[in-house]
Image (cartoon, rainbow, N blue to C red):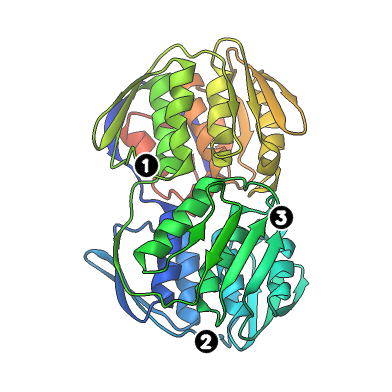
Amino acid sequence: MNCIIEASEIKGRVAAPSSKSYTIRALFAAALAGGTSQLINPLYSDDTNAAITVLENLGATITQNSNGLQVSGGPLSVSADALKCRDSAATLRFATAICANLPGVSVLESGPSLEKRPILPLLEVLRTLGADFNYKNNLITIYGKPLEGGSHVISGDLSSQFVSALLFVAPLLKQSSAFQLDSPPRSRPYIEMTIETLRNFAVQVSASSDYTLFKLSPQAYRPAVVTIEGDWSSAGYLLALGAIAGEVTVEGLDLMSLQGDKALIRILQKMGALILPDSNSVTVHASQLHAISFDMSQCIDLLPTTAVLAAVADGSTCLTGIARARLKESNRVEAVCKELGKLGIKVEEGRDTLVIHGGSPQSGVIDSYNDHRIAMAFGILALKVGGITITGANCVSKTFPDFWDILKMLGGKIKIENE
């Protein structure tokens, strides 16, 4: 699917999509709890559907009702069928840790994009806990058994999802566990979100103030009723759109949220955008933006959004802490550089830095790289610039299926072409 997008006058009020990260975390916790849990206002997307399918294959019962999702969990067991994680990295990584503790053989299958993303470091940590595995191409075969607790030193450079995966499985072990990171973690907010989710399901985690040491005793997950909050990652595209192309109000955002991508508010403020927050919504008005310097290491998913904002800002924006963006659904550093270059914007790439020289982007054809965040970020820029076609635009279904419809509702001139 391609989107042909013209410059548009944007104005409107929309609800933030529900958080993908909280939905998947709550699904896993509920599946591990004996009894029935209720998830209110969950996100329905490709990634969350992947998590639901995997957990159902492991023995959880998940049904949709008028309030959201009802999850009947309890002791899980290995599946005779391969666990198809599609392109959901959180689903693959959390399920890998859970399956390592289930007696028997589990096979986890990755989608084409996820196959390219790291998993071996997590498998090696699980091996130190007693699991064994085979890993080839897009298939992971886990030879599970009750894992050992104890103290383990792991790299702080591991994905935050690897740390979260270990936190999910640790309460199920017969002995207490301690995980010592050799350096402060990247994307710490996602670990904080995992700990908050575990607490909602009666599991307590002891964490040091710098989040380099985590201790968990054997504990039982308990059923819970959880309301999923709005997603700052997805809402960020809409807020950025308001800053460059009109006026947008996004409802259902918690200004006290642990989500790291709430940092977009700070980014927009530093760039000079007019922002009007209230208790449950944020309004952003079109403003002349200015170049900034910003460390993206704790909010790496905001890189494409920040990059397109920088493309229309006065001056040269320097973004640091961007190296891990090369290991996402696409190499997002390379994608941002190439696609902004097509529009006439000069970008300088370093190992962990990106310098974007703002200007007046031109029309062009943008490759989405089958990456939802690249497609959405350049979709926002296209509504400012006009004359831009985005190829493979249906990839937004990974996290934000209604994205293009919402842009149209806000006044976006978007023509959809099915290939």
Residue 225 quadrant: bottom left
Query: Is residue 251 toward the left or the right of residue 270 in the image?
Result: left
Amino acid identity at mark 3: Ser
Mark number displayed over residue 77: 2
Query: Is residue 393 toward the left or the right of residue 402 in the image?
Result: right
Amino acid identity at mark 1: Asp
- Which residue is at 63% across, 81% downward? 147
**Residue 331 screen position, x and y as percent:** 70, 43
Observer-nearest residue: 334 or 123? 123
Sequence-first tag of 3 and 1: 3
Observer-nearest residue: 296 or 182? 182
In the picture of the structure, the residue carrying the numbered disc 3 is: 155
Neighbours of disc 1 within 10 Å: few (<14), some (14-19), many (20+)? few
**Does dot 2 land on a helix, a strand or a loop?**
loop
**Residue 35 screen position, x and y as percent:** 32, 81
Rounded to the nearest angstrom, the CA distance separating label 3 from label 2 is: 30 Å
